[in-house]
Image: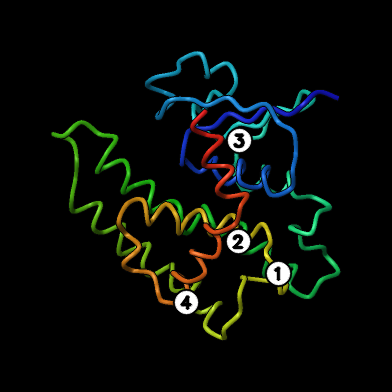
């Protein structure tokens, strides 16, 4: 078996995968790419025709969805939630919510505030999708409102990685002012984890 390869852009949604790798201590080969790869790394198309990050290559299999890659990384570790556990389906729901509901509006914000050339930037679209994110992020606050430390299963899991990245991305966009107090405190706990710090340091190499 060959060592997995992770294709990554610093602080992009592939950070979920690198963070998970550091949490479980998995050996991977990391390829840092410039963002966005479709503009600055044309050779990457041979790995992932979608030209998005992440891409995970392992024993002939290529995965391109950050949630699926995180689930592969944490499988059979304490960061996974097993089917026999009471919070299993809540865990799976959070894993799917992380991209489809929470990261998507932030990606639109990035496009229309940073990626597009100045004459194509749309401040109103960015504001609308920030509001979209704010409404969806209330689900995080509701889950933490009873004083729980982590989202599910009474421990830190991949759900905290997946959703934590979305909250972190909002912070990098100065959109975290829409997050509730419990969510902000939880985000600080996520960022305080040594594996998160190692992942962010490693991506600078």
- The earlier-in-sequence mark between 1 and 2 is 1
Q: Residue at x 62, y 58 (%)?
A: 95
Distance from the alpha carbon under mark 1 to that under mark 4: 16 Å
- Residue found at the very far left of the displayed protein: 119
Q: Secondary structure at mark 3?
A: loop
Distance from the alpha carbon under mark 2 to that under mark 4: 14 Å
Question: Circle 2: is it few (<14), some (14-19), or many (20+) Cα within 10 Å?
Answer: many
Question: Circle 4: is it few (<14), some (14-19), or many (20+) Cα within 10 Å?
Answer: some
Instruction: Read off the residue under disc 2.
Output: 160
Instruction: Read off the residue under disc 4.
Output: 182
The percent coordinates of residue 41 (x first, y second) are: 45, 18
Distance from the alpha carbon under mark 1 to that under mark 2: 9 Å
Choose between 136 and 26: the one closer to the eye. Answer: 26
User: What is the quadrant of the N terminus in the image?
Assistant: top right
Q: Residue at x 67, y 71 (%)?
A: 152
- The earlier-in-sequence mark between 1 and 4 is 1
Q: Quadrant of residue 37?
A: top left
- The earlier-in-sequence mark between 2 and 4 is 2
Question: Circle 1: is it few (<14), some (14-19), or many (20+) Cα within 10 Å?
Answer: some
> Left or right: 170 with respect to 17?
left
Q: Residue at x 36, y 51 (%)?
A: 172
- The earlier-in-sequence mark between 3 and 2 is 3
Q: Secondary structure at mark 1?
A: loop
Instruction: Read off the residue under disc 3.
Output: 64
Q: Secondary structure at mark 2?
A: helix
- The earlier-in-sequence mark between 3 and 4 is 3
As displayed, is residue 138 above or below residue 99?
A: below
- Residue found at the very far bottom of the displayed protein: 146
């Amino acid at each position: 078996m060959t060592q997995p390869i992770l294709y990554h852009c610093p602080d992009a949604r592939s950070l979920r995968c690198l963070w998970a790798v550091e949490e479980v201590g998995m050996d991977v080969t990391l390829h840092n790419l410039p963002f966005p790869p479709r503009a600055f790394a044309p050779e990457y198309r041979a790995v992932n025709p979608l030209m998005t990050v992440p891409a995970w290559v392992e024993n002939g299999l290529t995965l391109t969805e950050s949630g699926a890659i995180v689930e592969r990384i944490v499988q059979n570790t304490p960061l996974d939630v097993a089917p026999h556990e009471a919070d299993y389906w809540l865990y799976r729901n959070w894993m799917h919510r992380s991209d489809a509901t929470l990261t998507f509006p932030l990606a639109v914000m990035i496009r229309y505030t940073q990626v597009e050339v100045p004459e194509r930037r749309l401040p109103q679209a960015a504001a609308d999708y920030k509001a979209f994110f704010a409404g969806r992020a209330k689900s995080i606050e509701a889950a933490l409102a009873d004083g729980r430390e982590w989202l599910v299963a009474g421990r830190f899991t991949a759900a905290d990685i997946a959703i934590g990245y979305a909250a972190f991305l909002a912070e990098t966009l100065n959109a975290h002012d829409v997050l509730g107090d419990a969510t902000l405190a939880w985000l600080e706990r996520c960022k305080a984890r040594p594996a998160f710090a190692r992942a962010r340091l490693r991506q600078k190499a």
